[in-house]
Image: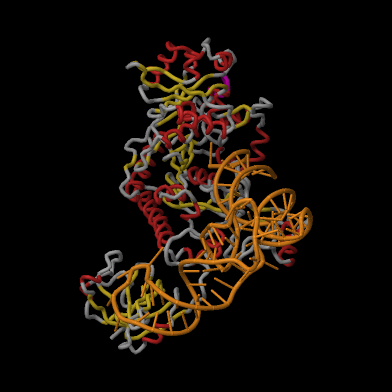
Amino acid sequence: MVSHLYRTHTCYDLTRDHAGQTVRLSGWVHRIRDHGGVLFVDLRDHYGITQVLADPDSAVFSDVENLRAEFVIRVDGEVRLRDPSLVNSKIATGEIEVFIRDMEVLSRAEELPLPVFGEPDYPEEIRLKYRFLDLRRTRLHQRIMLRSKVISWIRHRMEARGFTEFQTPILTASSPEGARDYLVPSRIHQGKFYALPQAPQQFKQLIMIAGFDRYFQISPCFRDEDPRADRAPGDFYQLDVEMSFANQEDVFSTIEPVLRGLFEEFGGGRTVTRNFPRIAYRDAMHEYGTDKPDLRNPLRMESVSEHFAGSGFRIFASLLERKGCEVRAIPAPGGGSRRFCDRMNSFAQRQGLPGMGYIFWRSRAGEIEGAGPLAKNIGPERTEAIRRQLNLGMGDAAFFLGGRPRAFEAVAGRARDEIAGQLDLIDHDRFSFCWITDFPMFEEDEESGALDFSHNPFSMPQGGLEALETGDPLDVLGYQYDIVCNGVELSSGAVRNHRLDVLYKAFEIVGHDRKFVDEHFSGMVNALRFGAPPHAGIAPGIERMVMLLANMENIREVTLFPLNQRAEDLMLGAPTRPTNEALRDLGLRIVGDVESRTRPVRGATGQR
RNA sequence: GCGACUGUAGCUCAGAUGGUUAGAGUACCGGCCUGUCACGCCGGGGGUCGCGGGUUCGAGCCCCGUCAGUCGCGCCA
């Protein structure tokens, strides 16, 4: 009658329509409720939960009594309709239950280090060491499924748009990206190392040069840099894209609908920016204090230097006499109380600034009046001019930061977010996208004055060779762009430099001659010599997108088996010290104080 | 590399100002309970208070060092 070895249905399948049928289910014991004469077991599998039960009428009643959490069991039984008063609306199978006639324990479980039932927070160390238990928990389980669905959706969408997925090598050569490489020693070439790709940057360009026209890959990337909450150590994934005979516009018009569609599909109904605004890097820094602005925050900074120049507020007035200095205002509608202003001022102090001046507007005898020490110093006319410029009114405030923009912009950006957060001006039900464009090609080292590439040196400068040969290199912009959503940088991309003469010139500006370029980037240089099409691309981070969709702030919450903050795998115990035989094969010897530096990774062997 | 916060039972946490035998919930073990769905009730076992040193008559608590975790800065697109 019951044919399959383990199950006829999943723990999500059974409904009132199955009442009276004999079924077979397998799964984990999620939770047991023992009432003496009747035993309830929540049986869980990947799909859902079904309540199974036994009483002394069941031949296996005593076996069911001995079950513990996370045992894996198979039960045979009959589906019974629940009395309407006993229906559990929280689970899909809540209208029925299964009366156990036979049961088999497929696998026992010891006392759990990490309960699967319930969703309280547990220390990451435990969660990572017992990741397989953590992954059984509903929410993480669902997020990993979300990630998988996102990737699948992207694949279909990209293929439908005429892109082809290719796999690029994992063992490769060091690339010109800026991060530290993971190195893999070569056995055949002792003393030489492969690098794991920081991104398939060179390969995707070579694929274009090879004539494949439109490439994408859900590609693993490896970077040996210290992590952050939104930056995994070790490996992460990108939607890597490259297009031939394409300019910046083509990339934008191709990727925008993909991202919009993705966030509409999986964003749980949150609204998605219809047309992604484009903000020049310079404007982003000016108005938002960052190149990854959160546009859910409506506040924009403005220059108010003219109102402070020559004013009675000496600190700003004398500041403004120096070259390159200005004063910017952050408007704070609704922040017009001394209490709030003082709180923000001390926020700025905690961020390492001497403070943040402010004006707030209140009513006095029916008239609007600017208050606070700054207003007193600059007088009512200038105060009123500022109010008009910022379009503020009664009950509003504005904060002021002065100096060289580079020195205060970052803090100003954080203050902008802090102010909007405190005043509840951020719409959390939105995905606000924007493109950041026109990044400068070069930057000047503040101390030495030396020029260097500010981003990827292989990007095409706007204006091409002519722009590089005439005028100030610091004024040259690149066809480089970022895509940002809710203050999270999803990706950067660029129109690539496919012209050798332009590439040589760009490197010359930062002090490297032809020989240097030929030696360091021989693969790319060679490829550019034999007919490279104009091409451009982008590479949004998969985890970053899933994080946003899942409303998480930590990348490990959307990763199956993440490394910890010290790039250790606590579950399987990586990295490990190789055997002496392996080292000999590779021609390697570990030098220095090995004992203190190759501390075994805790976890795998259970020591602590 | 640097900074902030954290480290007490298998797990989550509480332990003012230093003071007798370090507590609770949960999990685990035993008992009771036929309608629960975070079931309930009774009982029990379980601790090198991260580690080392110091101050003190006395340290989970104070001091120094060290290890580990998270978050941030540097770094990183």
Q: Is residue A589 visible?
A: no
- As drawn, is B7 to the left or to the right of A256? right
Total number of numbered discs in the rendering: 0
Figure quadrant of the C terminus of chain A: bottom right
- Above or below — where is B7 with respect to A483? below
Determine the residue positioned at 39% across, 59% down: A142
Which residue is at the front of the view, B26 or A437?
B26
- As drawn, is B77 to the left or to the right of A248? right
| Magenta stretch bounds | A467-472
Q: Residue A586 placed where, x, y %? A: 72, 60
Q: Is residue A92 visible?
A: yes
Q: Quadrant of residue A86?
A: bottom left
Which residue is at the front of the view, A119 or A461?
A119
Determine the residue positioned at 43% across, 36% down: A422
Q: Quadrant of residue A242?
A: top left
Q: Residue A466 placed where, x, y %? A: 53, 22
Determine the residue positioned at 50% across, 34% down: A414
Which residue is at the front of the view, A573 or A411?
A411
Task: Verify whether residue A43 appears in magenta.
Answer: no
Task: Give the color scheme: rainbow, by chain, secondary structure or one colour.
Answer: secondary structure
- As drawn, is A299 to the left or to the right of A461? left
- Above or below — where is A79 with respect to B52? below
Determine the residue positioned at 40% across, 72% down: A31
Q: Residue A81 placed where, x, y %? A: 22, 75
- Above or below — where is B40 with respect to B74? below
Figure quadrant of the N terminus of chain A: bottom left
Task: Verify whether residue A470 appears in magenta.
Answer: yes
Q: Residue A514 placed where, x, y %? A: 65, 32
Q: Quadrant of residue A186?
A: bottom right
